[in-house]
Amino acid sequence: MLDRRYRMLMDKLGPALPGLLVMSLFINLLALATPLFVMQVYDRVIFHAGLTTLQALVLGICAVILFDFFLRQARSRVLQRVALAVDVDLGRALFAKVAGLPLQVLEARPGHTWQFLFRDLETVRNTVAGAAIVAIVDLPFIVFFLGLVIWLAPPLAWVFAIVAVAFAVLGLWNGLTVGHATRLEREAGMRRDRILNEIVLGRAVMKSAAMARPLQDLWEDGQAASIASSIRRGRLADSSMNVGASLGVIATIALTSVGAVAILDLEMTVGTLVAANLLAGRLIAPLSQLISSWRALAQMRDSAGRLAAILAEPDDRRADAIDLPRPSGRLQLEAVSFAYVPEAPPVLGNISLRFGPGGLHAIVGPNGSGKTTLLKIAHGLYRPSKGRVLLDDGDMSQFSRDQIARWIGYVPQDGFLFSGSVRENIARFSGEVADAEILAAAQLAGVHAFVADLPDGYDTQVGEGGSRFSTGQRQRIAIARALVGRPPILLLDEPTSNLDREAEEELRRQLVELGKSTTVIVVTHSPALLQSSDSITVLIKGNIALAGRSDQVLPRLMGNNVRQVGT
């Protein structure tokens, strides 16, 4: 049973493999022309002054060289097409897989891990189109050339056998040492790049806190470790290549010496010895090529393994089982518990809540009480460890990610925007959203007022992560994005944290109005929003401390318990 990483490669390389083997067969057969040409020149032309024979041999070898060139070109183009298929098909599959993985899986690994996966894709593509694959395809013909040498020059057979065994031992040692060193080099590079990635993400903090010098020291430590591992891998690879080159020279000397003795004993001719030396080069070439390409092969093997592992991960439900009508907006959590890892204490414990349809519902609690986690579970981004989430009495787990995104709008704390225009971000980069829907969402979120004043209006580019807008403006655009299509449920995580008092009051009025037809659930500590809420839930250490109608909970919340549940 093939390992899944090799199955993945064979899915792309397999259809082209018969053609590659046929072309390699003819290329290797044509390779016999040169030693045969040399042997005939030494044994017939020189000793018999056969100029006519020489002319015929030259014409024949020229035709062989031309045919060999076209075959090699054809083989290279086949490999390039395979590499293109790897790049296109696997690239599309990898992006779809990363985008379709559960949020908990994505958050469990550093961001640079996902970037390196696409570098792994490039490694596989470049190796498939490179000399290493050609050497592997040529490898079976070593047996053919070895048999030919035994038939052509029996006295040299044992020399060839020893050389082949020596190269096999060198290849095994190279695979164990260089392969391990290559993995260590990659891990050191990832640690270094992780530091650089965090520096770029936290550039404002680095500047404001004057952390450049200590962060540079951290990066230089990582760079030094990466360089050290690279040097060690390079030394091992260079040693293997140098040993391989020395073995090639030793093979030539041994063949020539043993052949000379055989010629003196009249067991061989000079032409046969020269031809045997040329065949020896043909036999050794793919072995030497494999040794020099071992790093690329080791990287491809590891890269293919990582890609296969990710592609085998279960992802969110993508297909709609049935086209369901728009929900009324009733959301219910039944005995929901959640822990990030099974052995860790739960972040949420036995939460049972019911919201809507309609109304403005507030969730409040101290930092670390599980408010954001609760919203992510309500949106289906996290799966409960125990219990379940119901949308209009239907288990949330049965719905696809597209269905949930249409029915439940979600605004996280950071209000992240993607590079593109304001219109594209509100429309979620979909060409199917009408301008009227975009404008309606923008007006509800208070975006239209400041975007209309911009020279490019809704075509204004937001910059990387929305950097051309203030934090509050980014938050409003994110709210507009969540409102597109008027979902029956809207989840907001601290939507007023970056708004001034006037903007907060405007948002409060909009959410109260939305609550007449939409179930609005908001994590907040804003007194204005709390006073306008229909219900309030207080979380402390992952458990419900208070819950009920606003007029019942708010007096207790604003009384003696306010310091326990405030920010």
Image (tube, grey):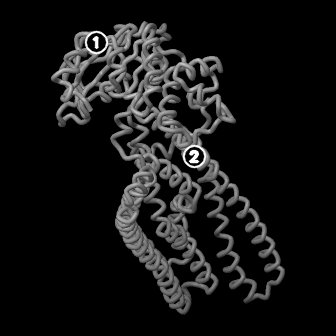
Give the structural element (helix, strand or loop) at label 1. helix
Q: Say which amino acid is labelled 1.
A: Ser
Q: In the image, 52: left or right of 496?
A: right
Residue nearest the viewer, comparing 483 with 189: 483
For image coordinates 46% across by 65% down, the residue present is 294
Category of crowding for the residue at label 1, using alpha-carbon neighbours closer than 10 angstroms: few (below 14), some (14–19), many (at least 20) = many
Residue 513 rendering spot, x and y as whole percentages = 46, 11
Residue 329 rendering spot, x and y as whole percentages = 41, 10
For image coordinates 53% across by 43% down, the residue present is 467
Vertical arrangement, residue 261 with respect to residue 277, above or below: below
Vertical arrangement, residue 482 with respect to residue 161, above or below: above
Q: Residue 512: which disc? A: none
Question: Label 2: which residue?
Answer: 87
Vertical arrangement, residue 174 with respect to residue 508, above or below: below
Mark found first going from the N terminus, 2 or 1 = 2
Question: Label 1: which residue?
Answer: 550
Give the structural element (helix, strand or loop) at label 2. helix
For image coordinates 17% across by 34% down, the residue present is 345
